[in-house]
Image: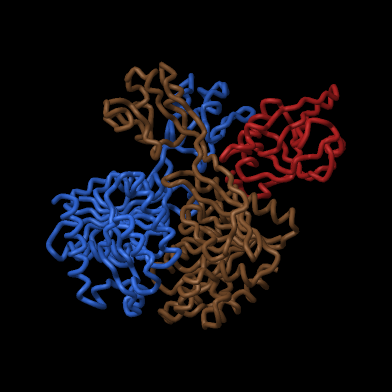
């Protein structure tokens, strides 16, 4: 399983970024070899619109199965759905805690967008 | 923390005068003027600008005359009629291709298709925004450059800044003065807020505009209440508005009488409730009690 | 001749001036069109009560991807500066609400897998009311981007001798779309601090675009003299002043014309038009 975690930093000890589209980074953990890859998401932080769409595209290129963040706008959610990526809602701790919860299937999966779309 | 936004659909129904009074009546809040085209709230809040920040609205194309061979390919690609081929004083009245910055949408299609790479694509400063101190609390406001686009993005910048301020300073209320209409800046002003207060007046025009606005707030599922300004100009239509609100199950929080005191307060650069006693001031105080209950 | 009625601040009386002037011109036997470009909140129909003869959809073009031809190469997504199209797993998704209809994606697609298809974002109506040719654009509720509706409306062939354009409030892109290419802009204001502040912005706007303009001061006796002072200092023509009259406010609330209250106004609006016609083509 490949898990993407929206993150405020590049370490396993970094805090999970609640924002999906405008997360600073995505850290991608692969359970098969326990590798961790850092994907920068900074081109999106300043996008006028559609940051969530772009973020979903970025992580879908990395063949991710599930993503962890807490705020998903309507377009981001639709994009993740199209890509077949599960959107898990959690941002109460660190990246390693998020990985742990994801592996043990302890995360709540969104079934619809939970925030209004951003305009910036 | 609650974001309360005051909008109207139709312009000139008294949003800003009302927000000025609510700024005086409420406690522990930050004010935001999201009418970035024509911001007026600061005129009655006695503000002092503390910080001025450039607003980058997006990118725009411009032709580099030295590289342009006048092939005209860009003209065929632009869907916004932004490429002009006529004499222009900036080109020494020579007939050349140039880009009308007001029409350019910033899509970069011309940039990509120019065989000479003669079109630059740079960020555009399309306004500025301000952090002000007022006797009522912090105010976040802006000035969109004349004839600029991207007002929705600027509104989002202001709201984000206000949220940050509210978190830093432990404020309970974000009081937002919204723009007129139902388009881009209005949608950016209301999405995700806690409560929308619609200021209408008893006229056919204002009622028509209110109905479209109520469809919009319903579309986004935001709790909404109504305030009838200048309610005595046409009592019959005021009753119709109340009837409409009842049918839609929306509260009418207040009825403000038409009162010259509103203009007098503006001339004194004060809010209505701080410019002596008047029927309008009393009505606004009563209104605030109702709204306060609705948002708490 | 095309005359636009605009103002920075909302609710100053744009629609009142535009409809009353249009009717005054029609009563002189001229062929006149009223074009309501306040497509977010069009109100002119309330006063002119037109009989609508035709309605069309106002559309924008959005991409449609043929997945049979698509190789998921991602060129479309890379070309879109608005993030409105994305390759997601085994599919391509389009997000029409943030698409600006630039055609960039279909232009770059190496497989010609992208077509442009129309998406309705509003409506345009045409009719006749009070002897005036009536045109209105109306943005669908929930749509964010209004200028394409205005653009479609402005492109309609109005052969009328005089065209009166009722612009939306403000100074940004929807207003520019409404007033560009007109011969004269009337800026309506009221003599209050808010009115003056917004008038200054509106004057800056028409000067930036380079259109001839003049000022109408509505409810001219409710505020102070600073607006007139500003106009004199800036050499702006004050074309007309209209004092506050509660009977007019009440008639307005019912959707009635000013001349219903005071027949004098028909002459005054004809004179307003004549003075502008004189300035535009002496």
Residue B181: x and y, percent?
46, 57
Quadrant assignment, res C198: bottom left
**Foreground of the two, A116 or A31:** A116
Colour treatment of the image: by chain
Position of residue B244 in the picture relative to residue C18 (left or right): right
Q: Is residue C44 visible?
A: yes
Whether B18 is drawn above or below C105: the answer is below
Across the whole image, how many numbered discs are drawn on residues? 0
Residue C38, percent from left and from top:
37, 55
**How far across and down, in percent of the image, does residue C195 sit?**
41, 63
Nearer to us in this view, A14 or A67: A14
Q: Which chain is blue?
A: C
Instruction: Report if residue B214 is visible in the image.
Output: no
In the picture, measured across the screen, residue B289 lies left or right of residue C169, that is: right
User: Who's the residue at 54% across and 51% down the image?
Assistant: B142
Indicate the colour of chain B: brown
Residue at image location 40% in from the left, 36% down from the top: B101
The red one among the chains is A
Quadrant position of residue B3: bottom right
Which residue is found at the position 34% from the left and 35% from the top?
Answer: B81
């Amino acid at each position: 399983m490949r898990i993407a975690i929206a993150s405020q930093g590049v370490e396993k000890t970094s805090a999970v970024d609640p924002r999906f589209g405008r997360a600073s980074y995505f850290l991608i953990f692969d359970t098969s070899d326990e590798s961790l890859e850092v994907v920068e998401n900074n081109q999106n932080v300043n996008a006028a619109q559609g940051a969530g769409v772009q973020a979903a595209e970025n992580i879908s290129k990395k063949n991710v199965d599930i993503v962890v963040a807490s705020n998903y706008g309507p377009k981001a959610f639709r994009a993740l759905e199209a890509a077949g990526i599960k959107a898990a809602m959690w941002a109460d701790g660190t990246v390693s805690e998020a990985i742990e919860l994801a592996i043990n299937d302890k995360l709540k999966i969104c079934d619809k967008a939970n925030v209004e779309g951003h305009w910036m | 923390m609650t974001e309360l936004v005051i909008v109207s659909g139709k312009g000139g129904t008294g949003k800003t005068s009302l927000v000025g009074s609510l700024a005086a009546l409420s406690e522990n809040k930050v004010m935001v003027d999201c009418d970035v085209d024509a911001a007026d709230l600061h005129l009655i809040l006695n503000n002092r600008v503390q910080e001025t920040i450039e607003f980058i609205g997006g990118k725009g194309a411009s032709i580099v005359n030295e590289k342009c061979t006048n092939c005209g390919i860009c003209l065929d690609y632009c869907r916004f009629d932004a490429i002009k081929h006529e004499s222009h004083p900036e080109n020494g009245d020579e007939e050349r291709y140039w880009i009308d910055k007001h029409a350019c949408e910033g899509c970069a299609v011309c940039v990509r298709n120019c065989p000479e790479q003669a079109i630059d694509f740079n960020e555009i400063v399309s306004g500025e925004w301000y952090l002000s101190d007022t006797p009522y609390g912090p105010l976040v406001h802006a000035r969109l450059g004349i004839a600029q686009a991207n007002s929705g993005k600027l509104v989002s910048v202001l709201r984000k800044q206000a949220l940050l301020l509210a978190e830093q300073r432990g404020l309970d209320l974000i009081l937002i003065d919204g723009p007129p209409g139902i388009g881009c800046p209005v949608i950016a002003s209301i999405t995700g807020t806690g409560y929308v207060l619609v200021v209408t007046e008893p006229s056919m025009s204002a009622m028509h505009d209110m109905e479209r606005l109520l469809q919009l707030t319903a579309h986004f599922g935001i709790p909404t209440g109504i305030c009838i300004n200048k309610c005595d100009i046409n009592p019959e239509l005021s009753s119709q508005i109340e009837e409409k609100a009842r049918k839609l199950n929306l509260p009418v929080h207040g009825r403000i009488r038409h009162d010259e005191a509103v203009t007098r307060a503006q001339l004194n650069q004060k809010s209505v409730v701080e410019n002596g006693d008047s029927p309008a001031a009393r009505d606004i105080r009563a209104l605030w009690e109702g709204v306060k209950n609705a948002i708490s | 001749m095309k005359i636009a009625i605009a103002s920075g601040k909302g609710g100053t009386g744009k629609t009142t001036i535009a409809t009353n002037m249009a009717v005054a011109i029609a009563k002189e036997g001229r062929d006149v069109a009223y074009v309501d470009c306040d497509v977010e909140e069009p109100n002119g129909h309330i006063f002119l009560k037109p009989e609508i003869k035709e309605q069309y959809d106002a559309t924008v073009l959005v991409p449609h991807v043929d997945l049979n031809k698509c190789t998921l190469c991602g060129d479309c997504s890379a070309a879109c500066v608005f993030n409105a199209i994305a390759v997601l797993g085994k599919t391509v998704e389009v997000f029409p609400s943030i698409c600006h209809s630039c055609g960039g994606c279909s232009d770059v697609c190496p497989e010609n897998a992208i077509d442009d298809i129309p998406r309705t974002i509003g409506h345009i109506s045409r009719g006749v009311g009070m002897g005036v040719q009536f045109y209105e654009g109306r943005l669908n509720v929930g749509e964010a981007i209004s200028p394409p509706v205005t653009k479609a409306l402005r492109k309609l062939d109005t052969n009328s001798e005089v065209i009166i354009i009722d612009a939306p409030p403000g100074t940004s892109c929807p207003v520019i779309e409404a007033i560009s290419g007109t011969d004269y802009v009337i800026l309506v204001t009221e003599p209050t601090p808010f009115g003056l502040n917004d008038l200054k912005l509106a004057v800056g706007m028409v000067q930036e675009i380079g259109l001839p303009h003049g000022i109408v001061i509505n409810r001219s006796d409710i505020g102070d003299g600073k607006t007139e002072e500003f106009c004199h200092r800036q050499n702006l023509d004050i074309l007309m002043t209209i004092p506050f009259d509660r009977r007019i406010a009440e008639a307005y609330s019912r959707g009635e014309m000013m001349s219903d209250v005071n027949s004098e106004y028909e002459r005054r609006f004809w004179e307003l038009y004549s003075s502008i016609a004189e300035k535009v083509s002496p």
